[in-house]
Image (cartoon, rainbow, N blue to C red):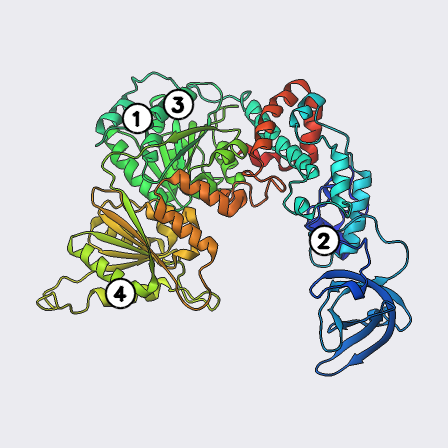
Amino acid sequence: MGQVSVAGKVDSSSKLSAPQKGLLKLGLRRDIDLALHLPLRYEDETRITDLSQAREGDLVQIEGVVTSCEVSFRPRRQLLVSLSDGGVSCILRFFNFYPSQQKSLAVGNRIRARGELRGGLLGWTMMHPQTRAATGALPKSLTPVYPTVAALPQAYLRKAVLSGLAKADLEETIAPEVSSALQPIPLWTLRDALNFLHHPSPDVSLCELEDHTHPAWQRLKAEELLAQQLSQLLSRREREHLHAPKLSETEDGLLYQGLLKRLPFQLTAAQKRVVEEIVRNLAQPQPMHRLLQGDVGSGKTVVAALAAARCMDAGWQCALMAPTEILAEQHFRKLIAWLEPLGVQIAWLTGSQKKKERAEMLAMIASGGAGLVVGTHAVIQEQVQFRKLALAIIDEQHRFGVAQRLALRSKTQEGDLEPHMLMMTATPIPRTLAMSYYADLDVSTIDELPPGRSPIVTKVVSEQRRAEVIERIRAQLMQGRQVYWVCPLIEESEALDLANATQTHAQLSAALNQADDSRISNDNAPAVMVGLLHSRMPVAEKKSVMASFASGEMGVLVSTTVIEVGVDVPNATLMVIEHAERFGLSQLHQLRGRVGRGAGASACVLLYATGEAPRLSQTARDRLRAMAQTNDGFEIARRDLDIRGPGDFLGSRQSGEALLRFADLNADSTLLAWAQKAAPIMLDRYPDEATRHLHRWLGGRTDFLKA
C-alpha cells in the first residue's frame, strides 16, 4: 500500500502544510485509507432550480448573473449580492466575507449559489450560500461531504480522496466461494462499491445512503466484519502455538479442597460449571484466554479464588489486578479471609504504598513467597518481577487498556511460557458483541445469583419528592439498616446544574440529625453518622470512611461513583442515586448492585431533575424505564448496547480507536454471522488473500484484538 501522494512527505511532519497535517490527524496515511474515508453526507449540485418554481425552505442550487454587490452597514456590516436567474432575483447575504470573495461576486459575473431559500419582504434570500463560478457542465454525481478537521478544506480532501481511490489496491481479496454466500445481497465488487459511495448518481435513494442499507454499503460492511473476524481467529490460532504452565486437572489439591471446605456457603451450579471450564483450560499447555462474565453479586470472586488455588497447588504464582484501589482492597480482604488460614501468603501492591512496605512486597513476589499478588495498575510496573507466574486475573477488564493487559502477560520469568489469562466483568456481554469483539475469547457465564439474595425494587422518583426520600432513609436507619446516596459530581459546575457530594453530605447530616416529633428529645436520639467518599480524598481517609461504613458504625454513605464496584456491605438496603438521568445504564445497574447483597429487602431510588431546562431527554427516559423494569444484567447490557453503541460500551478495550467504522452490530447481525463462517475458510484455503484483506482494513491495529 502506497503512501498518500497528495499529502506529500508524510514522514517529515515539520515540512507538511496544514491540510497535509490534517490528513495525518484523520489517520489518512495510505491510499487505501483515503479510499475508505467515506462521506458523511452528500450535496446535490447536479441540477439547477428555477427560482420561479422554488418553494420556501428548499435546499437548492440556483444560477444567474450578479446585478449588484455592495457592503451594507445596517443593521450590521454585511455583503449583499443580488443574483438574477433571468426572471426572479435572490439576495445572497454574507455577514462574514473576504475581499477575494467580494471580487468573485462582482457585478456581471455568472455564478451558482447553493443554500436554503427564505422568503421575505424583498423576495428570496439565501444566508451564507456556497458560491462558485458558473463554468463547465454540471456534475453528474452527488457531491460528497467528508468528515474533516480544522485547516483541511473539503476541496483539498476531495482531491486527496480521488487520488487515493485511483491509486489504492482494490483488487478483490474475498474468494468467490466466500463472497457468493453474501446472496441475496447484490454482489458489488469493492472497487464498484467505493466508486459509487464516493460519487453516487443523483437518482439514488438518499435514505439508503444515509442509513447504510444500500448494497454498496452492505459490501463494505461485510468486508469490514470479515477483517475483524479474521483478526480474532488469527489471534486465537496464534495463541495455540504459545506455551503456558500445564496445571493438573485433578481435584485433590490441598489448597483447592481446603478452600472449598472453608467457604461459608455452597457454590451455585453455575459457579461449579464455570470453575470446571477454567480448570480444564488450566490443564492445557496452551495459555487460557477466557472471559468470565456474571451479573453484579453473582460470585465471580470465589471462582477467581478457586482458580488461584489450583494454580498455587501446582507450585505457581497468581496475580489479580483491579482498576481501583477500593475494588482491589475488597478482593484482598476476601482472599485473605479465605486463603491466609490455609497458609497462603498474599502480597498487596498499590501506587499509594509506603516505600518500605512496597520493597517488602516486591521481595516476596520475586522470591515466590507470595503465592497470590493482589493490586491495582502497580502490579504491572517494571520493578515487579514474579518468580513463577502461571495465572493472571483481571477484574473489570474493560477498564484497562490493551498495553496494560499485554504488560501483565509478559510478567512470567519461566522461559517462553505465557501465563493463563482470566478476565472478569460484571457488565454482561450481549451476544452480537461477543460474536464480534470477543470472538478470540472463550466465554464463561455465571447466569444465576447465590441463594438468599433479596430482589431489588427500583423506583424512579422526581427530585421534588426529595423530602419523602429522606424520610425513607430515616425509616431504614431506625431498622438498623444502612444507606448509600450517590452524587455525580464533587463540586459545583456552571455547565451542569448538579448537586455535589459535599453539599449533599452537609444537607443529609443536618436533615437526619434534626429534632423529630417522634423522638422524646433530640439529645436522647442517637446521632446518625453520615460519611463522605470521593476520588479526590487521600487514600487513608478513603479507607477510614469505608471501614466505618463496613463495620455498621456509619449509617449513610454519600459518595461519588467510586463505589460503583467492589463495595460489599450486606446491611446496606437502600441506594439513592441523585441526578440518575446523568448516568449511563450500565453504570446505574452497577451502582444498584451495591444493595441487595444480604437477606434484607432492598430498594434503589433513582432521583431525576425536573427543572425547566434541560428537560429529561428521551434517551434518559429510556434508561430510567429500563432500570425500573428489570434487574437482569444481560437485558440491561442489551439495552445499553442499543443506546450507546459498541465503542462506548467497550470502554478502553481498543484504546479509544473504534475497530468498526461502518458495520452496526445489531442491524448487521446477518453479515456478522456470514463473516464468522467465512473467516476460517479464508484462513485455511486462501491465506494470502486473508493477509491482504487484514492489512487493507486494519493496518497496524490487529494487536488491539490480542489483549
Cα distance, mark 3 to mark 4?
50 Å
The percent coordinates of residue 341 (x first, y second) are 23, 31
Q: Earlier in the sequence, mark 2 or mark 3?
A: 2
Task: Tell me the mark number nearer the camera, choosing from 3 and 4.
Answer: 4
Q: Does residue 353 appear anywhere in the picture?
A: no
Observer-nearest residue: 118 or 690?
118
Mark identifier at residue 112 = none
Q: Is the residue 409 above or below the residue 593 in the image?
A: above
Cα distance, mark 1 to mark 3?
13 Å
Are circles 1 and 3 on residues that touch, CB within 8 Å?
no
Residue identifier under label 4: 467
Quarter of the picture holding the N terminus: top right
Location of residue 98 by image quarter: bottom right
Q: Considering the numbered disc 4 on the image, is that residue within a helix, a strand or a loop?
A: helix
Cα distance, mark 2 to mark 4?
54 Å
Task: Tell me the mark number nearer the camera, choosing from 2 and 1.
Answer: 1
Residue identifier under label 2: 22
Instruction: Identify which residue is drawn at 52% across, 31% down.
Output: 435
The percent coordinates of residue 456 (x first, y second) are 28, 45
Cα distance, mark 1 to mark 4?
44 Å
Q: Considering the numbered disc 3 on the image, is that residue within a helix, a strand or a loop?
A: helix
Q: Considering the numbered disc 2 on the image, is that residue within a helix, a strand or a loop?
A: helix
Q: Does residue 561 appear anywhere in the picture?
A: yes
Instruction: Identify which residue is drawn at 71% across, 38% down.
Output: 216
Observer-nearest residue: 682 or 456?
456
Q: Earlier in the sequence, mark 1 or mark 3?
A: 1
Q: Type of residue at label 3?
A: Glu
Are circles 3 and 4 on residues that touch, CB within 8 Å?
no
Mark identifier at residue 277 = 3
Q: Earlier in the sequence, mark 2 or mark 1?
A: 2
Q: Is residue 36 left or right of residue 531?
A: right
